[in-house]
Image (cartoon, helix red, strand yellow):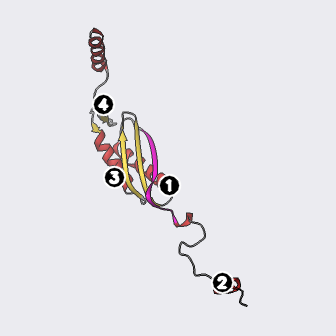
Amino acid sequence: MAGAVAALGLAMITLALAPGLRRLHTLASTAHLQAAVDRRALEALVQDAVQSVPGVSAVQVRLRRRRMTVRAELAFGSRAAVLDAARRQTVTALAGCLLHRTPRLSLSARLSPAWVPEPAAVSGRSSIPSAPDPRATARKEGTP
């Protein structure tokens, strides 16, 4: 019991000495004014920015103190192209916020179950089966 009370006291002292405003990210400013933005607002901003990328069907954003994780679900298109566009959109959205410390960015994309590849990525064959050549079937049956 005494060990638990000591551990709880140590945890409370650590929290008291740690810097506050863990849910807020401070903005860079030239004046003597300090401003901050909520993490959830930044998450929503980045989520909207990535959602506007063509081919993305769903987005999950998690922002911690120093790292932002963005997970996108692909509905169609090339994974590399969508990741590149999502990275550009995220960097642009975060640059517009003028954060004092920009979080490190981690982007990933997974394919949705109904994913359709980019038309250029599909092999040279058509997805519509062509009708069989009547001459080829006639040769197989033994007729000239």
Instruction: Please report whichever mark, 2 or 1, sits nearer to the chain's N-terminal start.
Output: 1
In this rendering, is residue 61 above or below 125?
A: above
Q: Nearer the viewer, mark 2 or mark 3?
A: 2
Residue depicted at 68% across the width and 85% down the height: 141
* Amino acid marked by disc 4: Arg
| Residue topped by disc 4 | 22
Q: Quadrant of residue 4?
A: top left
Residue depicted at 28% across the width and 44% down the height: 41
Q: CA distance from mark 2 to mark 3?
A: 56 Å
Can residue 102 be seen here?
Answer: no
Instruction: Please report whichever mark, 2 or 4, sits nearer to the chain's N-terminal start.
Output: 4
**Residue span colored magenta:** 104-118
Looking at the image, which is closer to me, 97 or 11?
11
Q: Nearer the viewer, mark 1 or mark 4?
A: 1
* Amino acid marked by disc 2: Thr
Residue depicted at 50% across the width and 55% down the height: 79
Q: Where is residue 58 drawn, in percent x and y? A: 37, 54
| Residue topped by disc 2 | 137
Q: Nearer the viewer, mark 2 or mark 4?
A: 2
In this rendering, is residue 31 above or below 80?
A: above
In terms of secondary structure, where does tag 1 sit? helix
Q: Circle 4: is it few (<14), some (14-19), or many (20+) Cα within 10 Å?
A: few
User: Does the CB distance between marks 2 and 4 fall below 8 Å?
Assistant: no
Q: Overall secondary structure of the magenta stretch? A: strand
Question: Which quadrant, please, contains the C terminus?
Answer: bottom right
Instruction: Please report whichever mark, 3 or 4, sits nearer to the chain's N-terminal start.
Output: 4
| Residue topped by disc 1 | 79
* Amino acid marked by disc 3: Asp
Q: CA distance from mark 3 to mark 1?
A: 19 Å
Looking at the image, which is closer to me, 17 or 134?
134
